[in-house]
Amino acid sequence: MRAGWGALAVGLLATSLGGCAMKVNRVQMDASRLAGKVDRRVACAYRQGEVVDARPSTGRAGGLGKHLFLVDDASVIVRERMTAFGIAPQGEGDEVDVRILHMYMAQNLGTKVPVVVLSATVGTQPAFTLRSQKASMNWNGSEDEAYEGYARALDDAMTQLVMRLDAGCRTT
């Protein structure tokens, strides 16, 4: 009789969990939705050099709730944010090369953690690493909320880059 109850319990558990399957919404990231707040622009002339998407993933950038974000080429996104922060696509000044090491969203029930890790080189100076991990409350796992998180992390990484660049500004 015990075996019968065990089989019944397993059957009920399988039936109840079967209804929990969530349909995943694959979202191709739209760079225009990542335009965050630019609090600071670079103080002297710098220009963009090589921007390389060196992420180990195959285009996935994590997700939030039922939304899985896909980014085919993160270098386009980073170049746009560099331009917004005053690092010109071409022109005068030292060249700033950037390697995108990570760009993803991690989550648990109550927290979302967008992560951006960049390695930057200015001219012939040694590379330095910039890491943004701006955790915040996961309210409802919406697509808009995810975009806000990605934008906040990107802007934080860009602000760190600008601060490093400004520290190296040459005064004449």
Image: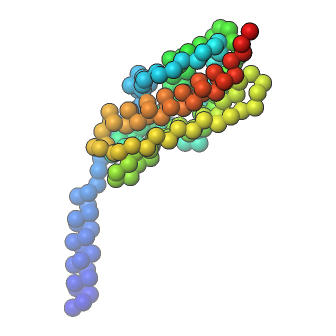
Q: Residue furthest bottom?
A: 1
Q: Position of residue 88 (x, y in %)?
A: 59, 13
Q: Residue at x 59, y 42 (%)?
A: 56
Is there any visible trace of residue 60 in the rendered image?
no
Tell me where residue 2 sits by quadrant.
bottom left
Q: Nearer the viewer, residue 70 or 96?
A: 96
Is there any visible trace of residue 42 in the rendered image?
yes
Image quarter of the N terminus: bottom left
Q: How is the image coloured?
A: rainbow
* Vertical arrangement, residue 171 with respect to residue 63, above or below: above
Tell me where residue 29 sits by quadrant.
top left
Image quarter of the C terminus: top right
User: What is the tally of numbered marks visible in this picture?
Assistant: 0
Q: Nearer the viewer, residue 137 or 10?
A: 137
Q: Nearer the viewer, residue 60 or 43?
A: 43
Tell whether 45 sits left or right of 114: right
* Vertical arrangement, residue 137 with respect to residue 51, above or below: below
Q: Position of residue 160 (x, y in %)?
A: 57, 30
* Vertical arrangement, residue 64 with respect to residue 156, above or below: below
Tell whether 3 sits left or right of 150: left
Q: Residue at x 71, y 33 (%)?
A: 127
Q: Residue at x 26, y 57 (%)?
A: 20
Q: Residue furthest right?
A: 124
Q: Nearer the viewer, residue 111 or 64?
A: 111
Q: Position of residue 55 (x, y in %)?
A: 58, 38
Q: Residue at x 33, y 36 (%)?
A: 145
* Vertical arrangement, residue 92 with respect to residue 76, above or below: above
Q: Position of residue 12 (x, y in %)?
A: 21, 71
